[in-house]
Amino acid sequence: MDLTKDELATYLDHTNLKPDATKEQIQKTCEEAKEFNTAAVCVNAYWASFVAERLAETKIKTCVVVGFPLGATTTEAKVAEAESAMKKGADEIDMVINIGELLSGDNEAVEGDIVAVANAVHAKDKLLKVIIETSFLDEEKIVQACQLAESAKADFVKTSTGFSSAGAKIADVRLMRETVGDRLGVKASGGIHSFEEATAMIDAGASRLGVSATAKILEGNK
């Protein structure tokens, strides 16, 4: 896809999920997002209100991760995290599925986990993205995870946390898009560091990209 810098920026969730991120660094993330007019700023829950306040006069969304990065917290904890984040200004929630239960074949547990968070998020008219952590999954499990997310009424499926052994791959993004069609969004996240890599993910079917290298990707391009 032939996109301009400004067009590509609208696909980006400008992300800072580093455990050692300082207030000054989160501030810089917000300023960069405003400079480039990205879709969202994605942060850990502690920074939700800080980010929401700094984006208040813009159309940029505040995105907060839940059950991050392992997905192995209880459903009750994920719901509480999501509700707290939204109370503090989050517009979008990116939750990690229960990866172990998916690999164990307990699809009911996986779907129930997503349903509970989806219900909480949609009760506030917010948006839910479901991180399936593709680096742990074969093609069959990627398809299953996407189907469960769709059945649970999620709004997006997302490839990765960026904290596992690998991030987004073109083949996985393409498979996810083939599975959910145009019914859900697909977010590619992890390991996207250039304009070319970003547009390749969009060509494969991604409708949102999670990136920390926003400035590197956009500066000096079209």
Image (cartoon, rainbow, N blue to C red):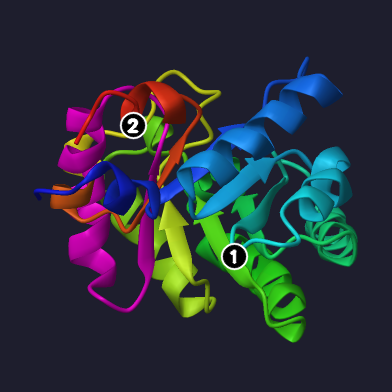
Q: Which residues are magenta?
A: 173-201
The reply to whether residue 101 is in sight is no
Q: Amino acid at mark 2?
A: Leu
Circle 2 is placed at which residue position? 218
209 in relation to 180, above or below: above
Q: Residue 118: percent from the left, percent from the top?
A: 65, 73
Element class at badge 2? helix
- Ranked by sequence position, the earlier of labels 1 and 2 is 1
159 in relation to 112, above or below: above
Q: Residue 69: percent from the left, percent from the top?
A: 65, 33
Outermost residue to the left = 2
Residue 25 falls left or right of residue 49: left
Element class at badge 1? loop
Circle 1 is placed at which residue position? 59
> On the rendered image, what quadrant is the C terminus found in?
top left
Residue 53 falls left or right of residue 134: right
The reply to whether residue 166 is in sight is yes
Q: Is residue 219 magenta?
A: no
62 in relation to 194, above or below: below
Which one is nearer the viewer's eye here, 91 or 19? 91
Which one is nearer the viewer's eye here, 56 or 110? 56
Q: Which mark is residue 110?
A: none
- At a point 22% along the width and 49% down the height, the residue shown is 202
Q: CA distance from mark 1 to mark 2?
A: 19 Å
Determine crowd level at label 1: few under 14, some 14-19, many 20+ residues with C-alpha closer than 10 A. Answer: few
